[in-house]
């Protein structure tokens, strides 16, 4: 399985439009080679370089496994967004306080759907995914203000 973006390549800079310095909308993504046995997809976007440790920018689960793309500034129909470290649901763009940070766009294929409320945070989402992950893919974007 692969996750790619038409606006940046792996380990390359995320365009300003998708950050706190731009319009802070989610970039577009494309999904490839999702396992046929997948029942749902999960997308977790985080910054492992944040001063306080891992900082969560977006949580989306119960994405239909037939989904081949997420368009700019959108959420797939039927998918649920969780609570980020900004304290809100929805996408929060990169906004590093200093230096270049890595933003991980992690896609997981699960053999189940998840019954979780939008108040769910990353740790609870990952706990609920445990034992159901078929495969995962990762795209890393860089951003420096």
Image (cartoon, rainbow, N blue to C red):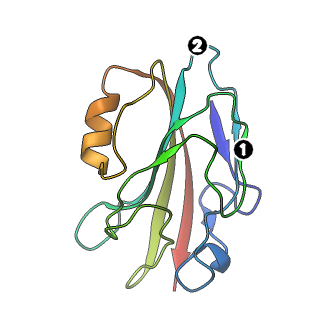
Mark 1 element type: strand
Residue 28 coordinates in the image, percent (x, y): 70, 57
* Residue at the right extreme of this rendering: 6
| Mark 1 in CB contact with mark 2 (< 8 angstroms) | no
Q: Quadrant of residue 96?
A: bottom left
**Image-based side of 105 in relation to 29, left or right:** left
Q: In which quarter of the image is residue 1?
A: top right
**Image-based side of 27 in relation to 127, left or right:** right
The residue carrying pointer 2 sits among few (fewer than 14), some (14 to 19) or many (20 or more) residues within 10 Å by Cα, namely few
Q: Which residue is drawn at 69% across and 35% down?
A: 67
- Label drawn at residue 103: none
Q: In which quarter of the image is residue 52?
A: bottom left
The residue carrying pointer 1 sits among few (fewer than 14), some (14 to 19) or many (20 or more) residues within 10 Å by Cα, namely some
Compared with residue 116, is residue 99 higher up or lower down, i.e. above or below? below
Residue 70 coordinates in the image, percent (x, y): 68, 49
Compared with residue 23, is residue 78 higher up or lower down, i.e. above or below? above
**Image-based side of 32 in relation to 46, left or right:** right
Q: Of residues 71 and 77, which is closer to you in this image?
A: 77
Answer with mark 1 or mark 2, whichever residue precedes in sequence: 2
Q: Which residue is drawn at 39% across and 85% down?
A: 98
Judging by the rendered image, the residue that carries numbered circle 1 is 69
Q: Of residues 100 and 91, which is closer to you in this image?
A: 91
**Image-based side of 88 in relation to 30, left or right:** left
Judging by the rendered image, the residue that carries numbered circle 2 is 37
Between the residue at mark 1 and the residue at mark 2, the CA separation in whole angstroms equals 18 Å
Mark 2 element type: loop
Residue 8 coordinates in the image, percent (x, y): 70, 62
Residue 3 coordinates in the image, percent (x, y): 64, 42
* Residue at the top extreme of this rendering: 37
Q: Which residue is drawn at 51% across and 71% down?
A: 93
Q: Which residue is drawn at 54% across and 74% down?
A: 143
């Amino acid at each position: 399985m692969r996750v790619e973006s038409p606006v940046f390549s792996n380990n390359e800079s995320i365009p300003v439009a998708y950050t706190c310095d731009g319009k802070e909308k989610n970039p577009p993504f494309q999904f490839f080679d999702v396992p046929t046995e997948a029942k749902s997809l999960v997308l977790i976007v985080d910054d492992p370089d944040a001063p306080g440790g891992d900082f969560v920018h977006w949580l989306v689960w119960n994405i239909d496994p037939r989904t081949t793309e997420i368009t700019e500034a959108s959420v797939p129909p039927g998918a649920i967004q969780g609570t980020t470290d900004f304290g809100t649901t929805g996408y929060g763009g990169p906004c590093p306080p200093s230096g270049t940070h890595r933003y991980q766009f992690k896609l997981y294929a699960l053999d189940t759907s998840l019954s979780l409320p939008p108040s769910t945070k990353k740790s609870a989402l990952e706990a609920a995914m445990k034992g159901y992950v078929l495969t995962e893919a990762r795209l890393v974007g860089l951003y420096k203000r």
